[in-house]
Amino acid sequence: MTFAILNGKLIERNQAKMDIEDRGYQFGDGVYEVIRVYNGKMFTLQEHLERFERSTKSIGVSLPYTMDQLKSLLLELVEKNNLRLGIIYMQITRGVAPRNHAFPEENVEPTLVAYTREMPRPKDELQTGVKTILTEDIRWLRCDIKSLNLLGNILAKQKAVEHGCFEAIQHRGQNVTEGSSSNIFMVKNGIVITHESNHMILKGITKDVILGLCSASGIPVNERAFTLKELAEADEVFLSSTVAEVMPIIEVEGKVVGNGEPGPITRKIQELFVNEIEKQCGAL
Ligand SMILES: *Cc1c(COP(=O)(O)O)cnc(C)c1O
C-alpha cells in the first residue's frame, strides 16, 4: 500500500481526493517543493522546508504546521512508503472556497498534500550530457516563488521535448535566466557564472549547494546574469535541479558546447556534489 499526506494525515494514496473548488486546482494558488530521497534519506531537507516556508509567506498562506511537524510527517511518509530512491512532492494551496480571485474572507484552512515517487538518478545523462534549446522567458516577475503556476515553464519544456532536447534555456532579451525547472551555469576561463538569485529566477537548492561546494574548493564563481552571446562562447555549460543534479549541457540550440563533451569543471562539480549526497545520505 502507498500512502500520501493530506492535511496533516497519512492516508492511502488513492483515498487522497481534492475538492473541485480547491484554489490550487482553479488558480494555481499555491506553492510546492520537490525533495530528493537517496537511501531512504531526504537530501537538503532543512533547506527545502525553509524555502517552502518562505514561498508560503510570500503568497500570504500561513502554514498550519511547524517545521518540526512537517519534518516528522515527511519522515513518516518516506518510511511508510519504503522509499529508497525517489522524490517527495509536496504542495500547499490557499484552500477550498467559492471561486473568487480575491483571497477567501473567512479563515479557510490551506490544503497540504505530499506523496512520494520512486525515481532513479539520471545516470546516463549525467555521464553523456544533454541537449538544450533556447526560448524567450515569458513568465511573470516573481520567479523566486516556487508557485504552482507553471504554464510558462510547461510551454518552454514542451518546446524542448518537441526538439528532442532535455531542457529549454530561457532568456529575457539578451540575458539568460534559467531552465524550465532548473538553474543554468556557464564556465568561462575557469570561472563559474550563474544568474544571481533575485526575482527573475528560482533560487535552486541544488544551485546553492553547488555554490557552497565551489567556494569550499576554490572554484571561482560569479553570480550575475550572462548574455546569450556569452553562453554561445562558453567553455562549459551545465544545469542543476533536485532531480537532475549537476547535469552537463553539450548542445545549445543545435550548437555544440566546447568539444561536445562534459568539461573538466563540470565533472569536478559533479564529483563534489555526489560526495555531498553521500555525506548526507550514505553511499550511492
Ligand atoms: C525547482 C526549480 C529549480 C531548481 O531548484 P532545486 O531546488 O535545485 O530543485 C529551478 N528553476 C525552477 C523554475 C524551479 O521550479
Image (spheres, rainbow, N blue to C red):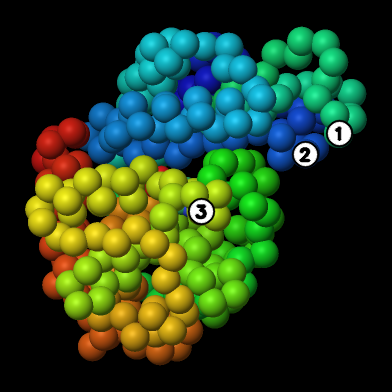
Q: Is mark 1 within 8 Å of ligand 1?
A: no
Q: Are marks 2 and 1 in contact (CB under 8 Å)?
A: yes
Does residue 242 lie above or below 227 as drawn?
Answer: above
Image location of residue 80, percent across then percent down: 38, 19
Helix, strand or loop under label 2: helix
Image location of residue 183, percent across then percent down: 42, 58
Mark 3 neighbour density, 10 Å: few (under 14) some (14–19) many (20 or more): many
Helix, strand or loop under label 3: loop
Q: Amino acid at mark 3?
A: Ile
Mark 1 neighbour density, 10 Å: few (under 14) some (14–19) many (20 or more): few
Q: Amino acid at mark 1?
A: His
- Residue plotted at (31% across, 53% down): 245
Q: Which mark is residue 201?
A: 3
Q: Is residue 79 left or right of residue 220?
A: right
Q: Is mark 3 within 8 Å of ligand 1?
A: yes
Which of pointers 1 and 3 indicates the residue nearer the eye? Answer: 3
Say which residue label 2 marks. Answer: 27
Q: Earlier in the sequence, mark 3 or mark 2?
A: 2
Image location of residue 13, percent across then percent down: 55, 25
Q: Amino acid at mark 2?
A: Phe
Residue 73: quarter of image: top left
